[in-house]
């Protein structure tokens, strides 16, 4: 049986990765801060699918967090066949009005932790000549987003980093994929402190993709050995292609009006 490590598995897209990977008979290492939620999900998936699960309650932004997780996995004698770097969060508002500490913590989680986990697990996958890494970017990674400036920049980093790794590793047997969801059902908007009025507008005016669709499209793209996948349908495809047709200054001004 293969083993997948999913970060941010306590809710939203990460929990759905855990469910769909369990249904495909993968053992799971589940990581997030909410240990109780991980334990509950793990117990449920174990009994439904006859797999093994290991819950690691860890704040990934804490010092030495990634090294601690890596050691725990080594100690259990586990081989990670699929790494899903999913943990991440955003923040809504003008950069100068928002807490700087939250922005730095976002860069730490969305970028540094993702790079460190990739750096720790990729060499062994290459040595074995098999494995996979799924990094969660966003449609926000394709252009600057006023009022989500740091978040969009982190997701641009994830997209570029991941596609470059895809090319570096495409003949090694290790599949690397950047997943770019649009607005998706999860706790994301709450964690990003979107204004209530805007969340209501999102629910009425903008269709949120279900995390089931995001994850099943991601796993299909991994099987097809794609470098990236924009999940959730036509509107998201349209948004990510805008920078190809609209001058950047015009685009960023329009996005500022929309947000
Ligand atoms: N939802 C969207 O519209 C959307 C669109 C594009 C991309 N994404 C990306 O999708 C990924 C998953 O987000 P989601 O939408 O599923 O949101 P979510 O429901 O808020 O899930 C975020 C996950 O990350 C974990 N997490 C947050 N901070 C952490 C920390 N310091 N240490 C460890 N784990 C931490 C959370 O668990 P704990 O709170 O238990 O730690 C949770 O499991 C993120 O990378 C996000 O940027 C989301």
Image: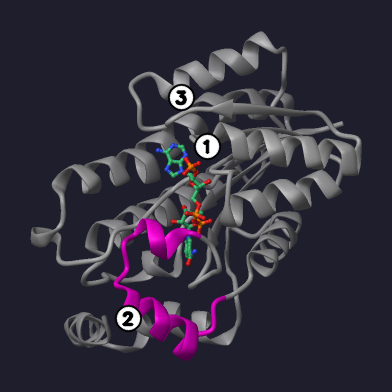
Count neighbours of disc 1 (C-alpha within 10 A) and say few if under 14, some if 14 to 19, many if 20 or more. Answer: some
Q: Which residue, given by chain and number where applicable, does mark 3 sit on?
A: 66
The spot of residue 51 in percent (x, y) is 86, 34
* Disc 1: residue Cβ within 8 A of ligand 1's nearest atom: yes
Count neighbours of disc 3 (C-alpha within 10 A) and say few if under 14, some if 14 to 19, many if 20 or more. Answer: many
Foreground residue among 119 and 41? 41
Give the mark nearest the N terminus, 3 or 1: 1
Q: Which residue, given by chain and number where applicable, does mark 1 sit on?
A: 34
Most common secondary structure along the magenta stretch = helix
Q: Residue at x 26, y 82 (%)?
A: 255
198 sits to left or right of 231: left
The spot of residue 127 in percent (x, y) is 67, 23
Q: Residue at x 77, y 53 (%)?
A: 20
Label pair 2/3, CB-CB below 8 angstroms: no
Can residue 26 be seen by looking at this rendering? Answer: no
Quarter where residue 250 is shown: bottom left
* Real-space Cα separation, disc 2 to disc 1, in angstroms: 28 Å
Q: Which residue, given by chain and number where applicable, does mark 2 sit on?
A: 197
Task: State how the image is colored.
Answer: one colour
Q: Residue at x 33, y 53 (%)?
A: 154
Label pair 2/1, CB-CB below 8 angstroms: no
What kind of element bears circle 1?
loop
Asked if residue 141 is among those painted magenta in the image, a careful observer would answer no
Which residues are the magenta region? 187-208
Q: Quadrant of the N terminus?
A: top right
Asked if residue 200 is among those painted magenta in the image, a careful observer would answer yes
Give the mark nearest the N terminus, 2 or 3: 3
Label pair 3/1, CB-CB below 8 angstroms: no
* Real-space Cα separation, disc 2 to disc 3, in angstroms: 37 Å
């Amino acid at each position: 049986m293969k083993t997948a490590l999913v970060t941010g598995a306590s809710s939203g897209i990460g929990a759905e990765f855990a469910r769909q990977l369990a249904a495909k008979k993968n053992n799971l290492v589940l990581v997030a801060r909410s240990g109780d939620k991980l334990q509950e999900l793990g117990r449920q998936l174990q009994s439904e699918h006859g797999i093994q699960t290991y819950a690691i309650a860890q704040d990934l932004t804490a010092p030495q967090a990634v090294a601690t997780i890596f050691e725990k996995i080594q100690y259990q004698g586990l081989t990670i066949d699929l790494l899903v770097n999913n943990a991440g969060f955003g923040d809504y508002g003008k950069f100068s009005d928002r807490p700087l500490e939250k922005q730095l913590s976002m860069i730490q989680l969305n970028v540094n932790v993702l790079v460190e986990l990739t750096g720790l697990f990729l060499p062994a996958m290459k040595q074995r000549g098999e494995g996979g890494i799924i990094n969660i970017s966003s449609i926000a990674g394709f252009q600057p987003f006023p009022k989500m400036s740091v978040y969009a920049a982190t997701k641009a980093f994830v997209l570029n980093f991941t596609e470059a790794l895809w090319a570096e590793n495409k003949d090694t047997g290790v599949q690397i994929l950047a997943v770019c969801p649009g607005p998706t059902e999860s706790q994301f908007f709450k964690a990003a402190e979107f204004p209530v009025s805007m969340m209501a507008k999102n629910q009425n005016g903008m269709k949120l993709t279900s995390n089931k669709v995001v994850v099943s499209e991601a796993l299909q793209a991994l099987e097809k050995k794609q470098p990236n996948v924009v999940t959730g349908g036509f509107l998201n495809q349209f948004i990510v292609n805008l920078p190809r047709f609209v001058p950047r200054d015009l685009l960023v001004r329009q996005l500022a009006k929309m947000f």
